[in-house]
Amino acid sequence: MTNNYLEFSEVLPHLTAEEERWLREQLESVCVFGDREYAQDELPSDLDAADADWSGCRAWRDLEGHDPDDGEMIGFECEFHADQDTPDGWGRHLWLHAEEGADLERIAHLVQKFLKHFRPDQCWSLTYATTCSKPRAGEFGGGAVFVTADQVEWQNAYDFVEQCRQAFLTEQSRRQVARLARKAEESGIGSDDLDEPVHEAAASTAASVNNRGLPSQIEYLIEQFGVEETEKTLDQILADRGEATHEESC
């Protein structure tokens, strides 16, 4: 059996007592009934957690797209440590880590909220590795998350490779166009000589677009002329149709 892993290790350093208290509260499991919120271990005896409108980690209540069915799971490993636990001078800090997998979106959300609340002029970053238990081709990568109070930016190895590939193909295409244009010029082929092949290619494209129906036609016109010109074309068709109807009624 082959397993895939996501691994990382980062810290939020130099925490004040207030910052640590806030983070602990954010990572606390809560149950929500209407507009009332209760910590999991402070739930009144007359309420059942199974009947809650929402339950889970407090930090994810304002996380867009978060599924309450995820329950109490934080989505990553985390521990609070004092300065004596490390020689790196982090002071009181929160250690965020994973050896098998984690929800990086949740981490970015938590850290961004933290920066907005306490350190709006600072930034934070996390780098991660994606690995495989067997040396399967294409199963190893990694990436990074860069967080500020206003923005979260993502990058990963697969996107980088794809961007480079697309840039390579674009440059390769440009070189081929230049090569064939040079060959045509050197052979005495002019633009008039290619009129018919171009018309044939365009007609083939037009037929394919028309056969796919109205949405495909509009999409093609927008790609060729833009939204404004396409809308003008539709308006002109409607105007012409109105004039024709008026003439028939007369």
Image (spheres, rainbow, N blue to C red):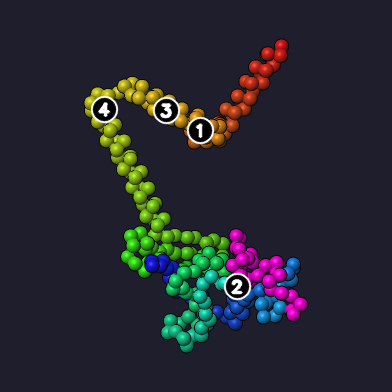
> Mark 3 belongs to which amino acid?
Ser
Q: Is residue 52 left or right of residue 132?
A: right
Q: How many neighbours does mark 3 have within 10 angstroms: few (below 14), some (14-19), or many (20 or more)?
A: few
Quick check: can you spot residue 111? no
Question: The residue tagged with tag 1: helix, strand or loop?
Answer: loop
The single residue placed furthest to the bottom in the displayed view is 84
The single residue placed furthest to the left in the displayed view is 187
Q: Quadrant of residue 4?
A: bottom left
The residue that disc 1 covers is: 212
The residue that disc 2 covers is: 72
Q: Is residue 108 left or right of residue 162?
A: right
> Mark 2 belongs to which amino acid?
Glu
The residue that disc 4 covers is: 185
Q: How many neighbours does mark 4 have within 10 angstroms: few (below 14), some (14-19), or many (20 or more)?
A: few
Q: Is label 2 in contact with label 1 (beta carbons under 8 Å)?
A: no
The residue that disc 3 covers is: 204
Between the C-alphas of marks 3 and 2, the distance is 57 Å
> Mark 1 belongs to which amino acid?
Arg
Between the C-alphas of marks 4 and 2, the distance is 70 Å
Q: Is label 1 in contact with label 3 (beta carbons under 8 Å)?
A: no
The single residue placed furthest to the front in the displayed view is 1
| Picture coordinates of residue 19, whole percent (x, y) | 59, 77
Residues in magenta? 44-71
Q: Does label 3 or label 2 sit earlier along the sequence?
A: 2
Residue 52 vs residue 160, the one in the foreground = 52
Q: How many neighbours does mark 1 have within 10 angstroms: few (below 14), some (14-19), or many (20 or more)?
A: few
